[in-house]
Amino acid sequence: MEQEKNDNHYFQSPGLILFIIKWKAPLFIITIVAIIGAIIFSSPSFLVPKYKSTVIFFPSSTNSISRALLSDGNQPSQDILAFGEEEQAEQMLQILYSDEIREVIIGRYNLMQHYDIDATASFPRTRLYKKFEENVNFERTEYMSVKIEVLDTDAKTAANMANDIAALVDSIKTKMQRERAIAGLRIVENEYKTEEEAVRNIETDLDLMRKKGVFDFRTQAATLSEEQSMATTLLKNQSAALTVFEKYKPDNDTSVVNTRARIKGAEAQIQYLDSKLNELAQYGGINLRQMENLELEQKKLSGLKEKCNSARIDAEQVLPYKFTLNHATPAEKKAYPIRWLIVLITGLTAFSVSLIILLTLENLRHFKHLNHNS
């Protein structure tokens, strides 16, 4: 019991404090040396300071310009001012992590040389990519915004890189969507041209029928039928009147002559109207079908024209896909290394390790002493 009590003596608070006081000189010296070493080795001569620049932006919810600005009541529109949700933020992150953005930034800032990577050594691109990942970070914030952080030994370079990466998000997304929009535009334009040709063919057929006197089947049929009915009625009335006149008046009487003339006129008109109605009957059905087809094709053509205009806007116009909250500016203070934190952790670590070593050595000495006495 006495031995166990002595073994645990230094691990109790009063005993530990007494132990620290006993060995205060070596503990103090070791801690001070470690702190001085940390101050020296965390200086710019050993650790090159880095500056951090940050860009924060919200993705937009708009993908189609035409749908956002020119949509009608037949389809739901998009709010051009609405912030994007989680899905849009994740899409932005995927674009930021794309090889294209990384390669553009590497080439624009000559990062192989800037990061002092020997291009003739083994695996230079692998080491370059690793260095890039260490200095460039993308993340989604809790508010569904996207944050770009860039560390660099030059504050201005860090800010420029962060701003350029943010700008590339728009250009890359525009490029990807424009390729698809142009393909869609070509499809719609081809359909529009095909529909135009169909409308022209129908109009050509209708022009040929117009030359034959067939303009509007329903209107013409109603008009000719009415005129035929009036001519037939006139013929009957005049024929009845002529019968009466011939009974009571000589043949050279003015009334008889005029009545006979009106009868001939009515007969000639009925004959003319019969020929027109026969002609109308021959081409009327075709005219009616073609007029209906023309109306349907013109509606299709109008719809395709609207789609063509929308597709052309999506293919040619550019709309930012993000709302930038913070642009990157050159930092005035370095972000790495944090010397006071390095010195503090080093001092605490040196003190703790030396204390543990001294405690271990003291316990071993005490244990040997007890074994020797026993």
Image (cartoon, helix red, strand yellow):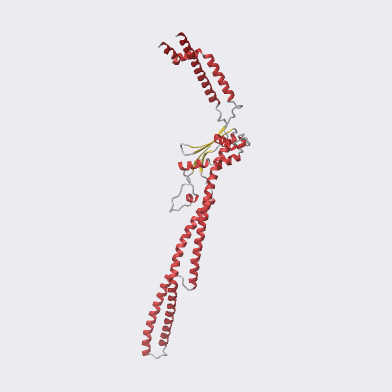
Q: Quadrant of the N terminus?
A: top left
Give whichever of 285, 34 is nearer the camera. Answer: 34
Where's residue 20, x and y in %?
49, 14
Where's residue 334, x and y in %?
57, 30
Q: Is residue 150 visible?
A: no
Give whichever of 218, 100 is nearer the camera. Answer: 100
Q: In which quarter of the image is the C terminus?
A: top left
Q: Is residue 305 visible?
A: yes
Count numbered badges in the picture.
0
Residue drawn at (42%, 78%) of the image:
274
Where's residue 212, x and y in %?
48, 73
Give whichever of 65, 338 is nearer the camera. Answer: 338
Residue drawn at (50%, 41%) of the image:
94
Please say if 370 is above or below 296.
Answer: above
Please say if 372 is above or below 220.
Answer: above
Residue drawn at (46%, 11%) of the image:
371
Please say if 212 is above or below 354.
Answer: below
Please say if 117 is above or below 231.
Answer: above
In this rendering, would 6 be left or right of 106? left
Hey, which residue is sitting farthest bottom in the picture? 250
Where's residue 355, x and y in %?
50, 17
